[in-house]
Amino acid sequence: MDEYFFNVDSGYLEGLVRGFKAGILTRADYMNLTQCETLEDIKLHLQSTSYGTFLQNEPSPLAVSTIDDKMKELLVVEFRHMRSHSVRPLSQFLDYITYSYMIDNIVLLISGTLHGRPASELISNCHPLGSFEQMESVCIATTPADLYNAVLIDTPLAPFFQECISQQDLDEMNIEIIRNTLYKAYLEDFYRFCKEQGGATEDVMCGILQFEADRRAIIITINSFGTELSKDDRAKLYPRCGKLHPGGLARLARADDYDQVRAAAETFAEYRPLFEGVGTNPGDKTLEDKFFEQEVLMNVNAFMQQFQYGAFYAYLKLKEQEHRNIVWISECVSQRNRSKIENYVPIF
């Protein structure tokens, strides 16, 4: 019954995001980009796409970081336009999307401060979708308790931070634990919210978030090998809203090497193909590449259903992948390393 009333509040924005999606680069666009000889050539080709003249005021020589920053600015403008015209529960859904950027910004600020980088430089490197008023104060925190009481208590991340308070000093290991603990709480809460929406939003988003939860669990396990992180502490970082929960997570918690991680994941038909053909030799795809390809496929399929919020999430993730693709091709052109220029993930 809700779909009959969906267009009252969200029909315009759903039509808008589907229009934005039509501007995503195609395989033909990527083929043209890979033929470019200079960054100026890339700039000229992008002018013929939905990006338009977004680089026309940038002086030569053009830098890859400038292309990245300008693409990010365009996406932020689009997202904020949709957010400013939305009402609950869509506005709340869009806010949930920004929380992941907040987490990344906080971790970037803490890590950068540990390495003695100036706060002004760190702030400029933060993603604008994850900005909040107290960001600069993050740099003065020395313990998670300080970080929570002085900064995060007034942000939407406060409920996610409760489990991090027990960590002592902010060193490299604890920062990664804090990042993964925050993501665990965030994904589980976002999953609960999407579940409550029901209908097509639940169908689309719960599948995407389950995949994201399982991907994080697999990557956390692989990255923990050879570190001081114990198996018990590692298990506490696994999001418990994915398809691997509970049996698959239990097997991951006991894993001692990559082969055991693969064996645990391959008991689930959805993840078996992701480990096939993975290698470390030149030309081989990495596990990360396979995850990106699967993520793109799921986000493209999110547009197959109407009257649901998953399209907004999917569009943002597809644009992020597009940005990674363009930056990768631009770096290869800039460094004149054409042997790896085809190592991008096409979307359409």
Image: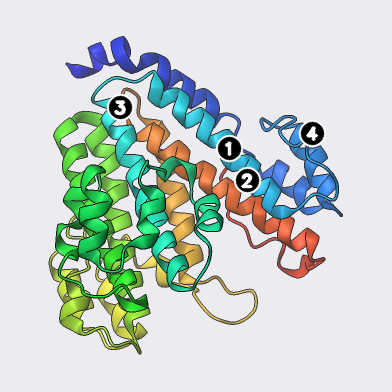
Label pair 1/2, CB-CB below 8 angstroms: yes
Image quarter of the N terminus: top left
- Estimate the spatial distance between the alpha carbons at disc 4 and disc 1, rounded to whole Å: 14 Å
- Upstream in the sequence, badge 3 or badge 1? 1
Res. 269 visible in picture: no
- Estimate the spatial distance between the alpha carbons at disc 3 and disc 1, rounded to whole Å: 20 Å
Is residue 332 shown left or right of residue 175? Answer: right
Label pair 2/4, CB-CB below 8 angstroms: no
- Estimate the spatial distance between the alpha carbons at disc 2 and disc 4, rounded to whole Å: 14 Å
Disc 1 designates what residue?
73
Query: At 22% across and 66% down in the image, what residue appears?
Result: 238
Q: Which mark is residue 91?
A: 3
Q: Which mark is residue 69?
A: 2
- Point out residue 313 in the picture as x, y percentages from the top left corner: 39, 38
Q: Amino acid at mark 3?
A: Ser
- Upstream in the sequence, badge 4 or badge 1? 4
| Element at label 4 | loop
- Estimate the spatial distance between the alpha carbons at disc 4 and disc 3, rounded to whole Å: 33 Å
Q: Amino acid at mark 2?
A: Asp
- Point out residue 51 in the picture as x, y percentages from the top left corner: 68, 33
Disc 4 designates what residue?
56
Q: Amino acid at mark 1?
A: Glu
| Element at label 1 | helix
- Upstream in the sequence, badge 4 or badge 3? 4
- Point out residue 193 in the picture as x, y percentages from the top left corner: 18, 38
